[in-house]
Amino acid sequence: IYLYNCVNGLLSDNTCLNNLARISLESSDGITVSDNTCTGNDYAIYLYDSDSNDVSGNDCDSNNLCGIYLESSSSNALTDNLCSNDNYGIYLTMSDADPSSLNTISNNTCSNGIKGIYIVSSSDGNTLINNTCFSNTNEGIEISASSGNNMINNTCSNNGRGIYLGGSYNNNVTNNSCSSNNQDGIVLGSSSSNTLSNNNCSNNDQRGIWIIASSADTISLNQICNNTLQG
């Protein structure tokens, strides 16, 4: 299903199997993509240069690359989607200096991939709230080279790392549970002016919180218990 330059449509209750991209929106705004089943494609749901869309209640399972992929797409709502056994559950990036910003990613489950939620390349001002990311090989949530993102009340367990910020600044990481990961709970690498507060980083196989080559970060009121190496 491919929508180009469309406005205010509804894509619902479709089953898309074994395609390059099951559901694609290009330069399309105000579209509701809901309750679809997308399995065995390269991309389950692909948004390019598309804003203010509602992507909710979709089952994106066993896709070769991504469950939900946003490129240069902003102000979208991604809610209550199941992304399992994809390389990347939810992926936000930019092209031609046009980032994916101001998106709300909430109540999604991203599991059994390489990364659960992956936000890169100046994708700024996104809100990640109440997502569950588990059993991913690398990170539950990774923010790379992006700023002003809010990560609140997410659960990241049994991943390589719970939450990783790389080359990112002015992000807020609050009230997340990053426990029982194979390596670390929360990691900041070459990142500055981030706030980490009220997170539970316990029972990880290496460190609770690990800060590498970073500056001016605020770390307060976190619970850090029973990690194998340092707190």
Image (cartoon, rainbow, N blue to C red):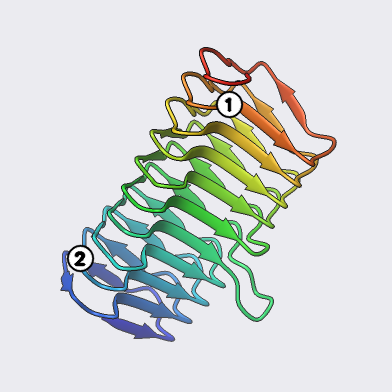
Q: Residue at x 55, y 39 (%)?
A: 163
Percent x, y for residue 25?
Answer: 39, 77
Identify the image quadrant of residue 192: top right
Question: Could you tell me how many numbered marks the image carries?
Answer: 2
Identify the image quadrant of residue 225: top right
Labels 2, 1: front one: 1
Q: Is residue 149 visible?
A: no
The amino acid beneath tag 2 is: Thr
Q: Mark 2 packing: few (<14 Cα in 10 Å), some, or many (20+)?
A: many
Residue 166, above or below 208: below
Name the residue tied to disc 2: 39
Q: Residue at x 52, y 77 (%)?
A: 49
Element under label 2?
strand
Which residue, as the protein is rendered here, is positioned at the far right?
216
Q: Residue at x 49, y 31 (%)?
A: 153
Percent x, y for residue 228?
Answer: 52, 19
Q: Is residue 27 visible?
A: yes
Identify the image quadrant of residue 131: top left
Element under label 1?
loop
Q: Which mark is residue 63?
A: none
Name the residue tied to disc 1: 207
Q: Residue at x 55, y 26 (%)?
A: 175
Residue 141, above or below 32: above
Marks 2/1: CA–CA distance: 36 Å
Q: Earlier in the sequence, mark 2 or mark 1?
A: 2
Q: Quadrant of the C terminus?
A: top right
Residue 218, above or below 136: above
Percent x, y for residue 44?
Answer: 30, 68
